[in-house]
């Protein structure tokens, strides 16, 4: 059985950008519901004894199991998203991650603009991502609904949840203001750098 992981910070830690009210609903209602649904769907199936990542990979695609995929991926996506944020985050990364962002996007500002555009242009519900591709390059991508780059051969490094439930209580329809607040004040670059280091070492191995 899967369990809802606790938030990695207090519910009011991301204020004033993302309020405790938003995090209460988003974590305790939305994220919890995906966990509960997944736990109701997998007993006595071929998915019952698999890890979350294995469930996602096996249930993805037209020949998979859409309901199991959607709930499993949303459990994974949300846990990842919480860790992409911190109080007093934002700003710019340093070290090898910063160097590769400059190499692959031209500049940090170009990267930042691309990620923000992905967040703004994802039509309807979904996610904007910084990923490492199969050939070790950094790229921006966006996915609809529960879809996750992990099942497309890419390694997620950073994500912005652009489902309305992520921002509507605080920003209403202003998704651009939410994306800007996320980038300016909330990104946990230490977490992103750790994901980058792990992905880089796996490519080198
Ligand atoms: Mn969400």
Image (spheres, helix red, strand yellow):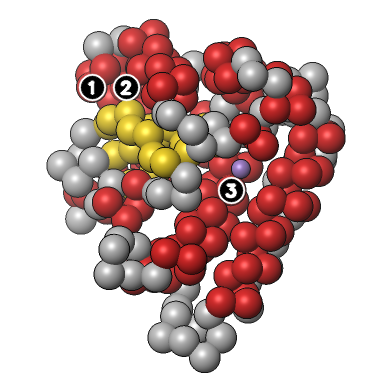
Q: Are marks 1 and 2 in contact (CB under 8 Å)?
A: yes
Q: Is mark 3 within 8 Å of ligand 1?
A: yes
Q: Position of residue 146 (x, y in %)?
A: 47, 50
Crowd rating for badge 3 (residues with CA inside 10 Å; few <14, some 14–19, many 20+): many
Q: Residue at x 23, y 41 (%)?
A: 133
CA distance separating discs 3 and 1: 27 Å
Q: Position of residue 178 (x, y in %)?
A: 62, 19
Of the 4 image quadrants, the one containing the C terminus is bottom left
Q: Quadrant of residue 194?
A: top left
Q: Is residue 204 above or below residue 172?
A: below
Q: Nearer the viewer, mark 2 or mark 3?
A: 3
Q: Position of residue 91 (x, y in %)?
A: 55, 15
Residue that badge 1 annotates: 104
Q: Position of residue 181 (x, y in %)?
A: 63, 16
Q: Quadrant of residue 21?
A: top right
Q: Secondary structure at mark 3?
A: helix
Crowd rating for badge 2 (residues with CA inside 10 Å; few <14, some 14–19, many 20+): many
Residue that badge 3 annotates: 78
From this viewpoint, is residue 38 visible? yes
Q: Residue at x 50, y 84 (%)?
A: 48
Q: Secondary structure at mark 1?
A: helix
Q: Is residue 188 above or below residue 56?
A: above
Seen in the image, is 148 located left or right of residue 67? left
Task: Tell which circle, 3 or 1, labels the residue nearer the N-terminal end.
Answer: 3
Of the 4 image quadrants, the one containing the N terminus is bottom right
The image quadrant where one finds ligand 1 is top right
Which numbered circle lies on residue 101?
2
> In terms of depth relative to the viewer, which is nearer, 124 or 171?
124
Q: Are marks 2 and 3 in contact (CB under 8 Å)?
A: no
């Amino acid at each position: 059985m899967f369990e809802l992981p606790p938030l990695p910070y207090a519910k009011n830690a991301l204020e004033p950008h993302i309020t405790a009210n938003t995090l209460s609903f988003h974590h305790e209602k939305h994220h919890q519901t995906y966990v509960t649904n997944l736990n109701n769907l997998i007993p006595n199936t071929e998915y019952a004894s698999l890890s979350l990542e294995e469930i996602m990979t096996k249930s993805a695609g037209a020949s998979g199991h859409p309901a199991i995929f959607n709930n499993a991926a949303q459990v994974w996506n949300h846990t990842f998203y919480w860790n992409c944020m911190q109080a007093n985050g934002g700003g710019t990364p340093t070290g090898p991650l910063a160097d590769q962002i400059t190499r692959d996007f031209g500049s940090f500002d170009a990267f930042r603009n691309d990620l923000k555009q992905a967040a703004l242009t994802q039509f309807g519900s979904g996610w904007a991502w910084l990923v490492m591709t199969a050939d070790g390059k950094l790229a921006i991508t966006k996915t609809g609904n529960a879809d996750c780059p992990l099942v497309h051969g890419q390694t997620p490094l950073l994500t912005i949840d652009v489902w309305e439930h992520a921002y509507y209580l605080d920003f209403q329809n202003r998704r651009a203001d939410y994306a800007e607040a996320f980038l300016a004040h909330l990104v946990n670059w230490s977490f992103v750098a750790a994901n980058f280091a792990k992905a880089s070492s796996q490519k080198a191995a």
